[in-house]
Amino acid sequence: MKRFFGHPMTLWPSMRNRLHIYALPAPDLRSALEERQRVLEAFDYCSIQPADYLHATVQQFAVTSDEVSPEEVDAFMVRLKSLAAETEPFSVELGEPEADDYSLGVRGTNTSSWAKLTAAVRDAAADTINKSQPLPNAPFIPHLTLGYAMAEGSTELIQRASDQLRAPALPPLTINEVHFIAVHQDANRGTFTWDTTSRFPFSDQPSAK
């Protein structure tokens, strides 16, 4: 493993309020992921992403909440509300944790529903909040990161420890809403957190109050 914080996708001009769209795990999945995170307690070169902030990135944007106008945000949220109302809930099957060069995480299966969602979000942002800069790449695959590499260390040891954990199979990631979030990066702790979210439920879900 090598330090994740220094990878181009983490080099934000400001470490606070970077705009994202996330899908958040349901409580049963969050609990199952938290159980799998415990193996990381033995490895000081990998962070543990706080369970309350586990997420699947739908899209990162190239701007912070401080760099966009209220009118641009409003226009984006109108687009989000519309696309959410036209999107049916779907699920992403998840594999067991995999360690790579930068993290330990779980990966999902790419589906047409996921691809359609990411494309629609990117189109909405390109016309509104992210129209002045190139959009960052879409996620390579649906995934939730359990912890990020903070320094060089053995990928194999983390993978072995994870593989030795005996736990029931992970439930799927059920995506029945998305969240518009201003994300804070803490490179010293190796975490991504936020203060509040704006929730956009899909077609058969109750609206946010």
Image: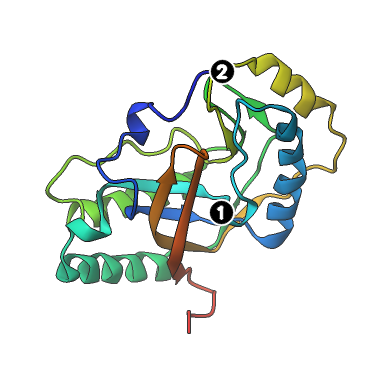
Residue that badge 2 annotates? 1
Is the residue 34 above or below the residue 3 in the image? Answer: below
User: Which residue appears at 47% of the width and 45% of the height?
Assistant: 112
Q: Give the camera-side residue of 165 and 39.
A: 39
Q: Is residue 199 found left or right of 122 in the rendered image?
A: right
- Considering every residue shown, the one lying at the far right of the view is 166
Across and down, in percent, residue 171 comes to 73, 50
Q: Amino acid at mark 2?
A: Met
User: Of the numbered discs in the image, which one, if any, rests on residue 14?
Assistant: none
Dot 2 alpha-carbon crowd within 10 angstroms: few under 14, some 14 to 19, many 20 or more? many
Q: How is the image coloured?
A: rainbow
The label shown at residue 53 is 1
> In which image quadrant can residue 152 be found?
top right
Task: Give percent across and percent down for residue 44.
Answer: 65, 28
Which of the two discs, 1 and 2, labels the residue nearer the N terminus? Answer: 2
Q: Position of residue 72 (x, y in %)?
A: 17, 65
Instruction: Give the answer, above or below, for where 168 lies relative to 6.
Output: below
- Residue 101 visible here: yes
The kind of secondary structure element at disc 1 is helix
